Image (cartoon, helix red, strand yellow):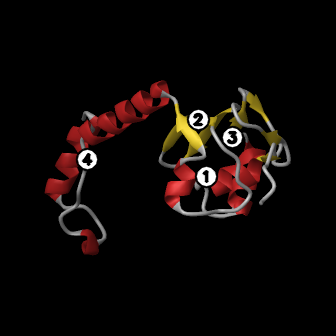
Amino acid sequence: MPDLLTEVRLDKWVWAARFFKTRSLASQAVDAGHVRLNGQRSKPARSVKVGDTLHIQVAHGLFEVVVQALAEQRGSATLAQSLYQETPESVQAREAVQLQQSLAPRYEAQHEDSGRPSKRDRRQIGKLRGY
């Protein structure tokens, strides 16, 4: 029977929960303050326990999660999702940001290989910037 974990390093858990692709990226993010444990900035070696709240800032959004289980090794995506429960406020906030981004105007150049915008492209850029 395997040993039951009571605490795990913060950088290992965030990596095992698949918020970061490598453990070194997870460690760097914790050092940079992109991962907060119970509302406070922490070091990568800080212990995570079941019931702790994490605020995780990654490229695709800000997550607020409650730790449900512990793992030191990275497993499947379904296993990783079972390690935490995202708060309803976090889900709503991320959906609101995604909606804003989808409704924001986008500029798409027709001739990207030419190197500079055409007269039509410049007009579109002007409209987006409010000129």
Residue at the (66%, 44%) spot, across then down: 69
Residue 61 point in image, percent of width and height: 49, 42
Q: Are marks 3 and 1 in contact (CB under 8 Å)?
A: no
Rounded to the nearest angstrom, the CA distance separating label 1 from label 2 is: 11 Å
> What quarter of the picture does the C terminus occupy?
top left
Instruction: Say which mark, if any, is on residue 65.
Output: 2
- The residue indicated by pointer 1 is 17
Q: Earlier in the sequence, mark 2 or mark 3?
A: 3
Rendering quarter of residue 20: bottom right
Q: Amino acid at mark 3?
A: Val
Task: Identify the secondary structure beneath mark 1.
Answer: loop
The mark lying in front, picked from 3 and 1, is 1
Q: Indicate the amino acid at tag 2.
A: Val
Amino acid identity at mark 1? Ala
**Mark 2 to mark 3 CA distance (whole Å):** 11 Å
Q: Residue at x 66, y 64 (%)?
A: 22
> Label 3, label 1: how many angstroms apart (C-alpha)?
13 Å
Callout 4 crowding tier (Cα within 10 Å): few <14, some 14–19, many ≥20? few
Please state the horizontal and vertical placement of residue 111, each as a whole percent of the image: 20, 69
> Going by the image, does 51 lie left or right of 129?
right
Element under disc 2: strand
Front-lying residue, 129 or 14: 14
**Numbered disc in front, either 4 or 3:** 3
Q: Disc 4 marks which residue?
A: 106
36 horizontally vs 113: left or right: right
Name the mark nearer the viewer: 2 or 4: 2
- The three-letter amino acid code for the residue at tag 4 is Arg
Quarter of the N terminus within the rendering: bottom right
* Residues at discs 2 and 4 in contact (Cβ within 8 Å): no
Q: Which residue is mark 3?
A: 35
The x and y percentages for residue 76 are 54, 63
